[in-house]
Image (spheres, grey):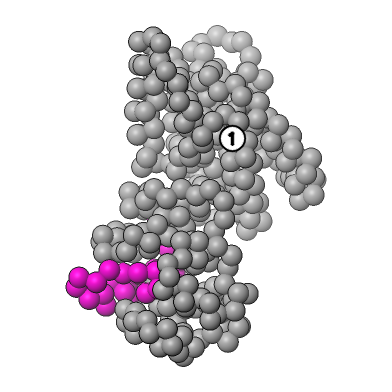
Amino acid sequence: MSEEYRIFLSSPNDVTVEKKALERVVTELNITHGATMGYRLELVRWETHAAPGAGRPQQIITELIGGYDIYVGIMWRRFGTPTGVAGSGTEEEFRNAYQAWERNRDIQIMFYFCQKPFMPKKIDEVDQMRQVLLFRQGLEGKALVWDYAAPAKFADDIRVHLCKRINNLREKRQRGPRAFTPPDEKISNALKELWPRMSPDLQRSMSIAYNENRQAGDGGIKTEDLFAALLRVQTEPLKLVVEDIPEKALPKPTAGPVVEKPYIIDENPWLSPCVASSIKRLSTQLPEGRPLTSVDIFADIAKHGTGGSVRLLREHKIGPREIDQILARKNLQVVGA
């Protein structure tokens, strides 16, 4: 039997194109990936799943909608109308989703904001846009938001993100239920203290790696994802190092559109053991006045790490001695060498 996943769409009434696009993408995924991989998506909207009843309208909608696996929020220029307990139905629905996520971290939350320009013609439109911006500002520390240029571009983004989220959910179901383990606060603090001393390219790479996982519903950095982000940003010194490493020993660079905003320093990420150990080690070894670079952290993990990405290097005969030899040939100095 197919695995069932419910997607709840939450939005004001000015994103009709996006709503139809999401409906098409869900149908497409059910016919293609879902049929092949054994899952089925159900798109849940108040327009199709709610019914008349007595009581507060938004509460009726919430009760009739029921539970879901993925929450998709969309906003452009309208915020919506007050519900009695929130500024709009979409805001109340997001609050409910976030509270559910706090109880069950398997729930996936995605929120999108359209960046298509428009010219307000009424004071009400200005006020609506102001509320949208304030709402977005409030999301910054709670969820990774995603901007898309125009309604016609939405389908391309949501298709990729839904595939990531479904893969994440399927992996979690296969593992079975497990208790949520909070990130190590000491490691998170060490990362944030080291952040101002990181070079811009390393900050970009850390942000991309975190945001890609956050977008997939997993708020942390795996070593493989950090390596992939480093290879995407790839400074000239790092390029000199990896050109002497077999291509199959490394992950492919992060592809497609990415979010580079440093949500990581405002949130509490978990780090893979290799990344966490490297952060702790390099924070004590970094000389005063010297920035920590992409080459520093790549070389440190490649030499001292023990996870899957490092085992892949070892399988291709790249160990600590080989890393040191590459650095020497390229005349590169790294922290802790």
Q: Position of residue 291 (x, y in %)?
A: 27, 68
Residue 147 magenta-highlighted:
no
Vertically, is 225 above or below 304? above
Of residues 225 and 270, which is closer to you in this image? 225
Relative placement, left or right, of 336 versus 84 is left
Q: Does the rendering let one see residue 15?
A: yes
The answer to which of 317 and 11 lies nearer the viewer is: 317
**Residue at image mark 1:** 153
- The residue at 46%/66% (across/down) is 234
Q: Residue at x 65, y 30 (%)?
A: 21
Q: Position of residue 181 (x, y in %)?
A: 45, 57
Query: Is residue 183 visible from the viewing direction of this image?
Result: no
Q: Residue furthest left?
A: 288
Q: State the extent of the magenta-drawn residues as a range.
A: 269-296
Query: Is residue 242 or residue 298 the one in the foreground?
Result: 242
Q: Is 59 on the left or on the right of 137, as rendered?
A: right
Asked if 79 appears above or below 328 in the picture, the reply is above
**Residue occupying image coordinates x 60% and y 21%:** 16
Mark 1 closeness class: few <14, some 14–19, many ≥20 residues within 10 Å: few
Residue depicted at x 34% and y 85%: 337
Kindly indicate the quadrant of the structure image that contains residue 39: top right
Q: Quadrant of the N terminus?
A: top right
> What SS does tag 1 mark?
helix
Please state the horizontal and vertical placement of residue 78, each as a whole percent of the image. 45, 19
Residue 273 in the figure: left or right of residue 32 = left
Residue 250 rendering spot, x and y as whole percentages: 57, 72
Q: Amino acid at mark 1?
A: Lys
**Residue 251 in the image: above or below residue 256:** below
